[in-house]
Structure formats: structure tokens, C-alpha cells
Amino acid sequence: MVRRKKRTGKIQVRSHGKKFPTDPRLRLDKLILALNTEPKQLLTLACADKDTWRSGSDLLHEWNNLEVNWTPRTTTLNNYCIHSLMPNGLARGQSILFDGTKELVKRFKLSNEGHHYGRFAAALMLNYCVENQKSLYEIFGSSSSNNDSCAPLTRLQILELRALGITSTKQLISGLNLNIRSIWSNRLALRSSGIIKYEPKVGGKAPIVEITSSGKSFLENLISPLIQLCTGSVEDITKSTYTKFQDRPTLRKYAKEATRLYQNVSKRIK
């Protein structure tokens, strides 16, 4: 691994970023919003660091060490930090003017919570993706808006309410404070991903909404450990999964496959 030469400069914009919440449910929401795709998981797990500020080019250098079949632009990695990690409390940003230059450079590092909660969560998500051959983007969808009605949170809430026996569209509209179109489109997306069986209402018959075996596995093997993580309890499965990725060849193997699976369902990278 080639070491990059350390540069000096003057900070122009001090460290900033949102705080990671203390409420366990809000923590879960933030992790899902921040890490809904495999590239964001890899950025958190293998590229960004808690102790070292890294620019987009620094992050790209770390990314290239993963040897995956897709090379993002530095602006893409910057945007992952600015629009996903920082707003959800997993990273902080600053701007520096390096000596002998005239252009500000944005740099990022993981927050303490990003290093702990973010990396553990990223490991669980990456592992789930590869072991189940399903990109989380296929399940969660886009987190383009960080509000309560965006796809990842809506889909998780629909699943959780179904697990409690709530299937009525009217109950979902009331419980989630969403319109019928949002409920309908997100249920169709969950059906398309194989997480639920959904047959819309026909005539006088009630709609059929059932969690599939894949959906049960998703809730048990990913969401449940994430919930425990957000309460401050790191389960053995979470520790062992994170430890597995400390082995570089294993991390590279999973990184390649996870990126391939994401490419299959996303128009953003090819």
C-alpha cells in the first residue's frame, strides 16, 4: 500500500456536522438513511477514518485499495459524506487551504459515533447484502430526502407494522401519517424485492400482505442486530461480522460482490 505524502495548510471552515442522536429508534433511522447503499457502507467501513481528515482524493485512494470493479469520482465520495454521513451524525467535515494552492479542499472524518455505530452497522449491512445476494438499495430505496416520509424509513415501518399484524392501508396511513400513494408504491417496492407478498385489494376482498421468508430473515438477521446496536448492546454476531472484515482479502472479496449487486439494481453506477 502506497502512503500518501502529508500536506500542510490552514483551516478555513472548522469541523462541523450533525450530532448522532441518543434515542435508539432515531439512531436506527439515521443508520439506515446514511448507509442504504453498499458504496456508502464501504466508505464508512474501509475508507473514512476517525483520527485522520481525508479529502475526496484521499478517500478514493482508500477505495482503490479495495480493488472493486467500479471507480467513483472524488465528487461522488464527497457527496456521500456531505449528503449521507454528515447529516446523520456519522461524519464531520472541514475545509482547508493547502500551502501553495488557491482552492479550498473539503475533508472528512468519521465522528466517534460513526466509528462505533457506523462501522458496526456497515459491516452488518455489507455482510447481509453478499450472504443474501441482495443489495440493500433494492430493499430500502433512495434516501434522497432526510425526512420521515423517505423510502428507507417508510419501508422499514411498513415491515415492522406488518410483523405486528397491521396490514390495513387505512391503519398504515394513520400510523405512518402518509398518503395512500406512498403506502402503495413502497409496498410494491417491498414486493419487488421479495421481502413481502402483496396482492392489492380486489373487489370486496382485503389486500394480502405477508412477510416472506426473505423478509423474516431480513428482520431477524439484519434489523434485529441493528436495533440491539442502537441500544448500546453489541451482539456477538455483530462483533464477529465486524472482525471478519478486518481481514483485507475477505473485505475485498465482499466489497467486489457487494458493488456488483448494487450495480445490478442502481442506475447510478455502471
Image (spheres, grey):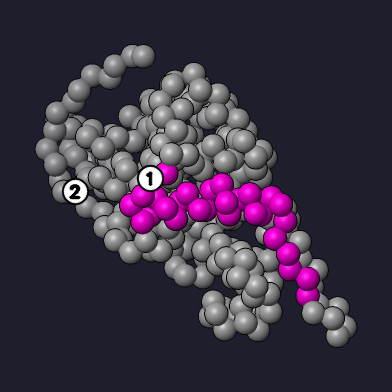
Mark 1 lies on a secondary structure that is loop
| Residue 108 seen | no
Kindly identify the amino acid type of the residue bearing the numbered disc 1: Val
**Residue 152: percent from the left, percent from the top?**
54, 60
Residue 78 visible: yes
Residue identifier under label 2: 15
- Amino acid type, callout 2: Ser
Choose top left, top right, bottom left or bottom right for residue 135. Answer: top right
Q: Nearer the viewer, residue 178 or 79?
A: 178
Which part of the image, by quadrant, shows the C terminus? top right
Quadrant in the picture for the N terminus: top left
Does 231 sit left or right of 176 as displayed? Answer: left
Q: Is residue 216 magenta?
A: yes
* Residue occupied by mark 1: 234
When the figure is inspected, residue 174 is found, relative to residue 251, above or below; the finding is below
Residue 18 is one of the magenta-drawn residues: no
Residue 133 % position (x, y): 66, 38
Marks 1 and 2 close (CB-CB < 8 Å): no
Q: Residue at x 16, y 48 (%)?
A: 14
Residue 44 x %, y %: 39, 39
> Outermost residue, left direction?
10
Q: Which residues are magenta?
A: 207-235
Q: Residue at x 44, y 21 (%)?
A: 247
**Marker disc for residue 121:** none
Frontmost residue, 225 versus 88: 225
Q: Secondary structure at mark 2?
A: strand
- The mark that comes first in sequence, 1 or 2, is 2
How far is the residue under mark 1 from the one under mark 2?
29 Å
Residue at the (23%, 19%) spot, across then down: 5
Q: Which secondary structure dominates the residues rendered in magenta?
A: helix
Q: Which residue is situated farthest in the top direction here?
A: 2
- Name the mark nearer the viewer: 1 or 2: 1
